Image: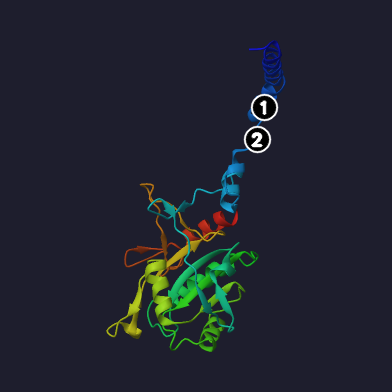
Amino acid sequence: MSKKSQYSYVGIAFIILVFGIIFIPKIIDRVKNDDITRSESRSETVETKIEETGNLSDMAFLEINGSKKKVPEFSFTNQDGKTISNKDYLGKVYVVEFFFTTCPTICPRMSRNLVEVQDEFKSFENFGVASFTINPDFDTPEVLKSYATNYGVTNPNWHFMTGKEADIYDLANNGFTIYAGKNAEAEGGFEHSGNFALIDKNGYIRSRVDEFGNPKIYYKGIVSRAEQEEDGEKEEISMLIQDITKLLKE
């Protein structure tokens, strides 16, 4: 090896040594002071920002195969004849129900309870309700409009939606696993769950957890706060209102 080559290697080693002395301590200080954030390699979703800022509440996510369950995509016509999709609810906390206007049993109770919930959040522009009819052949936008008026619905984010029967049933039974179906022997010709689903601002299904740490997933919608309990069923509207409040703060 020539003397010239030896000098070159010595020079490179000297530069590396100087770099280590000057810059490595600064890099370590930046890491300690959290100037370099790990989130640079993560997707900057709203959910990520919530988790990093510590604003996520104690509300549970519904997880299926390790993935947080989101509301499926949907697009229907509301009581004003406008097309409403799941994207219209992004940025809002909202409650989901499946009902029909001629229901002679649980639907009137559910609607009155949701109006009560609506009235608790009058000043919140980012709260809404999604009501899907399971009898779209009868429940036209005009019928839904009249129904909403009769029950005192005033929230502009409360949409009563109708569309293709197959799409609505798929959304209920597969999208939310809230049962809905035709039954000639049932009062009104249909049967369905009286449960409500609660959705956060990012479109995730949320709920509180039970005493074993498992998400409750749904809220019973047929017993009012005034009734407290009926046929052994305790009211969960108070619980729903409390949990909506938590999600609005996220």
The image shows residue 205, relative to residue 151, as above or below, that is: above
Can you identify the residue that label 1 sits on? Answer: 27
Q: Nearer the viewer, residue 195 or 106?
A: 195
In the picture as drawn, the residue positioned furthest to the top comes out as 3
Residue 19 percent location from the top left of the image = 70, 21
Amino acid of disc 2: Ile
Position of residue 242 relative to residue 179, above or below, is: above
> Which of the pair 9/232 is nearer the observer?
9
Q: Position of residue 222 (x, y in %)?
A: 41, 70
Residue positioned 52% across, 61% down in the render: 203
Return the mark for residue 36: 2
Q: In what element is the residue under mark 2?
A: loop
Up the image or down, 25 lies above or below 35; here it is above
Q: Nearer the viewer, residue 97 or 38?
A: 38
Q: Residues within 10 Å of mark 2 (few under 14, many from 20)?
A: few
Secondary structure, mark 1, is helix
Task: Report whether residue 250 is seen.
Answer: no
Q: Quadrant of residue 77?
A: bottom right
Q: Is residue 134 above or below residue 60?
A: below
User: Whole-percent x and y of residue 28?
Assistant: 65, 25
Checking the image for residue 123, the label placed there is none
Instruction: Decide which of 225, 121 is in the foreground and name it.
Output: 121
Q: Are dots 2 and 1 in contact, CB under 8 Å?
A: yes
Q: Position of residue 104 (x, y in %)?
A: 38, 83
Among numbered discs 2 and 1, the one appearing first in the sequence: 1
| Residue visible at 59% across and 69% down in the picture | 88
Determine if residue 147 is in view: yes
* Residue 121 left/right relative to 138: right
Q: Amino acid at mark 1?
A: Ile
Extreme-left residue of the structure = 185
Classify the position of the N terminus by image quarter.
Answer: top right
Looking at the rendered structure, the number of numbered marks drawn on it comes to 2
